[in-house]
Amino acid sequence: MKTLKMVPTRVRVTSILKRAIYSGEYKSGQELSLTAIAEQLGISRTPVREAFQTLAAEGLITLRMSKGAIVNKIDQKFIRDTFEMRILLESTAAAKAAQNGLKDVDTYIAKLKNMQAHIDTIDEKSYEDLNQSIHMAIWEAADNQKLTAYLMELWNGPSTGHAIPEEQKHYRLSTEEHIQLLENIRDHKAIAASKAMERHIKRSEDNVLEYLRKRDKETDK
């Protein structure tokens, strides 16, 4: 049986922490403990330390001498800048994947259609694992190690959690978008694949920005 592609542990940890920051689970000024997060995730401190370094480089946190970190304030411009880069790079990856061909593309489409048929009962982990595997397969098919490395650093996983109040709706829309994206890649439609990827990521951006606007409005009251 074919196994799903998985990103390295440090990247998975980084994406988990990014989503927690984007969604407001970790608030501006909150202190993060390297040891506590490692224990919570059931992993060693090494990938958490590496994730902290990545987040600090992006300006999401400020590292502390005590091996912890402080969450920085995240505004709408920061989110727009981050997603702008993802759109540029992943749209390029989708176009290159359409030109080069994507191994097992029909298998991924079949998995998505099966998920689509059972969308009301899908759980977050199943959705996230397939989502992650699809994006990684596209990066691999693009056949550019530099491009993949940059996308690994930008990866924040699917936009679920506190920022998405209607997760099932998000799963349904995202699954439809993934099917359309992969069908364009399968049919070697590079421009259509690029545009499909752009629409997919832009909707994720809109989800996060909508949450930030609501958060800021509540803060101003």
Image (cartoon, rainbow, N blue to C red):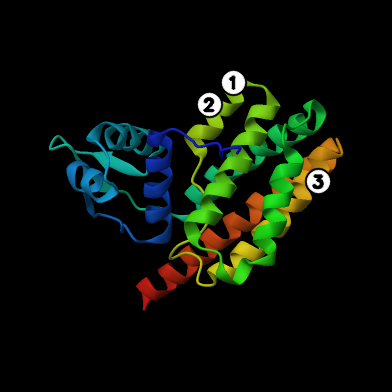
- In the picture, measured across the screen, residue 40 lies left or right of residue 216, that is left
Quadrant containing the C terminus is bottom left
Q: Which residue is mark 3?
A: 183
Which element is circle 2 on?
helix
Q: Where is 211 relative to 147, above or below?
A: below
Kind of residue at badge 2:
Ala
Q: Which mark is residue 149?
A: 2
Residue 217 seen from this side: yes
**Image position, residue 211 (x, y; %):** 49, 66
Tell which circle, 1 or 3, labels the residue nearer the N-terminal end. Answer: 1
Q: Which residue is mark 1?
A: 145
**Image position, residue 139 (x, y; %):** 63, 32
Q: CA distance from mark 3 to mark 2?
A: 25 Å
Residue placed farthest to the front in the image?
Answer: 1
- In the picture, measured across the screen, residue 7 lies left or right of residue 203, that is left
Q: Which residue corresponds to the image point at 51% horizontal and 48% vertical from the top-left?
A: 157
Q: Which residue corresponds to the image point at 52% horizontal and 55% vertical from the top-left?
A: 126
Q: Which mark is residue 46?
A: none
Which element is circle 3 on?
helix
Mark 3 crowdedness (10 Å alpha carbons): few <14, some 14-19, many ≥20: some
Q: CA distance from mark 1 to mark 3?
A: 24 Å
Kind of residue at badge 3:
Glu
Q: Quadrant of residue 114?
A: bottom right
